[in-house]
Amino acid sequence: MDCDPEIGAYYRNLFWLHTNKCQSIQRAAWASHISIVRNEEPPDPTKWYEYDGEEIEFDYTPPVNNNEIFYWLPVTCERLLDIREELGLPRQPAYGLHLTVGNNK
């Protein structure tokens, strides 16, 4: 799900400031987004388009997590979990809902 690009820009700038302006992380390939489906194939992929354009509120929790490559914020959102179920997927994704803000590839 696309998110306000300013969220990612804000946290990438904080990272740069935190490293005394010596290191930076780049914008994610798909800009700031919440991963709802990752490495999964819904039983009926055409159903995915039913949600196109839907505005969904969510909460995220700082601080930013990372695994040395990707940087993300944990997300909570019952609607996104409902969508996973409606798509025929397990309610909880393997990596949890998260808002990707950048990477250092």
Image (cartoon, grey):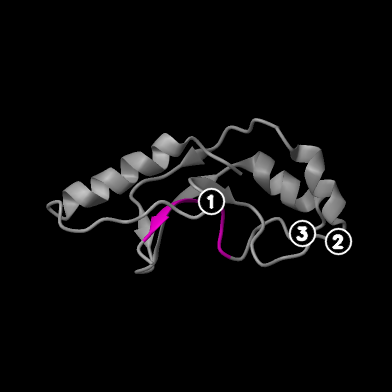
Counting residues from the start of the chain, the first of labels 1 and 2 encountered is 1
Labels 1, 2: front one: 1
Using the numbered discs, state the Cα–Cα distance from disc 1 to disc 2 in whole angstroms.
24 Å
Which residue occupies 74% across, 46% down? 83
Residue 101 in magenta? Answer: yes
In the rendered structure, the answer to whether residue 60 lies left or right of residue 46 reads left
Give SS at disc 1: loop
Mark 2 highlights which residue?
43
Q: Position of residue 42 (x, y in %)?
A: 80, 60
Give SS at disc 2: loop
Find the magenta span and give its range: 95-103
Q: Position of residue 74 (x, y in %)?
A: 47, 51
Q: Amino acid at mark 1?
A: Trp
Counting residues from the start of the chain, the first of labels 1 and 3 encountered is 1
Which residue occupies 64% across, 52% down? 36
Give SS at disc 3: loop
Q: Amino acid at mark 3?
A: Leu
In the rendered structure, the answer to whether residue 44 lies left or right of residue 104 reads right
- Above or below for 77 versus 36: above
Residue 25 in magenta? Answer: no
Mark 3 highlights which residue?
89
Using the numbered discs, state the Cα–Cα distance from disc 1 to disc 3 in whole angstroms.
22 Å
Using the numbered discs, state the Cα–Cα distance from disc 3 to disc 2 in whole angstroms.
8 Å
Which residue occupies 27% across, 44% down? 13
Residue 58: quarter of image:
top right
Check disc 3: other Cα within 10 Å, few if <14, some if 14-19, many if 20+. Answer: some
Which residue occupies 25% across, 51% down? 15
Q: Position of residue 3 (x, y in %)?
A: 53, 39
Mark 1 highlights which residue?
30
Counting residues from the start of the chain, the first of labels 3 and 2 encountered is 2
